[in-house]
Amino acid sequence: MVSAWLTDLDFDWSALAAAGREVSFQRDAAVFHEGEAAETVYLISEGRVRLSMFTVDGRERHLMIVGANGIVGDCGLPASRRHVVSAFASAPARLLSIPAREFLRRLEREPALARQHAALTSRRFRVLLQQLELQAHNSASRRVCHHLIGLSHAYGLPVDGGVRIGITYTQEEMGNICGLSRVSVSNIFSRLRRDGIVALHQRHTVVKDPAALEAMARGRAIPAA
């Protein structure tokens, strides 16, 4: 299981940052739209950006949430020169705007940057494959549990009484990524807390029973205590 939240990534983009110009976006503001010319690549300094696609009937399908030290706007390069997804700030965000031509030029000239970009691209591809599987075949509860497991694997810190997810997220973000309403997510979290599987501590989720959460994510019976 992988996390659909890609943030606080362990990459060194300093060679790219030198070519960037800082821009800011308020929550829900569009960074770019699917089909627009891909003239700019964005390196995220603070905040988060959600990547989405729109179905033929206009519904938004959320793909992943990219945070600090992530890159967006590069997915259509260099083949199509157009954005293949849309991007919106899911929280107030500060980004570095880098001309696409300069971005590609630096990848060509600096193998270390190219390797990092390939690693980031691979992670995003894994998230997309997971999203396809989750949306097609899983119940609402399984989707939420699956993403909680992914978050705990990527950002989990052992604490007394369980595993503390080291990043915060909103129920709206969880609903977006799961294709659910915020009310549905709230009801699922209420059941998980009632059953002693998760708890909240200072805005962070603590997974108190990882085995039970894993079983629910995979559609299996919860192990007996």
Image (cartoon, rainbow, N blue to C red):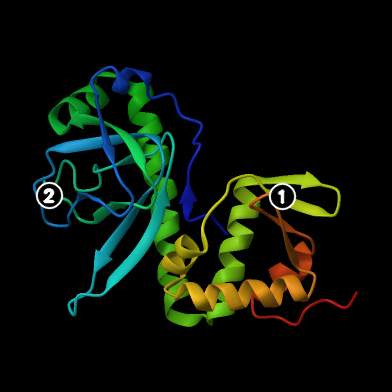
Three-letter code, disc 1: Arg
> What percent of the width, then of the height, locates residue 122?
41, 46
What residue does disc 2 label?
A: 82
Q: Split into 4 quadrants, where in the image is the N terminus?
A: bottom right
Q: Regarding mark 1 in the picture, which secondary structure is present there?
A: strand
In the picture, measured across the screen, residue 139 lies left or right of residue 12, that is: right
Tag 2's secondary structure? Answer: loop
Residue at 73% x, 70% y: name it: 193
In the rendered image, residue 130, in percent from the top left (x then y), is placed at 46, 64
Badge 1 local density, few (<14 within 10 Å), some, or many (20+)?
many
> Could you say where residue 26 lies in the image, as x and y percent from the top left?
30, 46
Q: Is residue 162 left or right of residue 38?
A: right
- Which residue sits at x=31%, y=22%? 17
Q: Is residue 207 toward the left or the right of residue 106 in the image?
A: right
- Disc with the residue nearer the chain's start (1 vs 2): 2
Q: Which mark, by number, is residue 164?
A: 1
The kind of residue tagged 2 is Arg
**Which quarter of the rendered picture does the C terminus lie within?**
bottom right
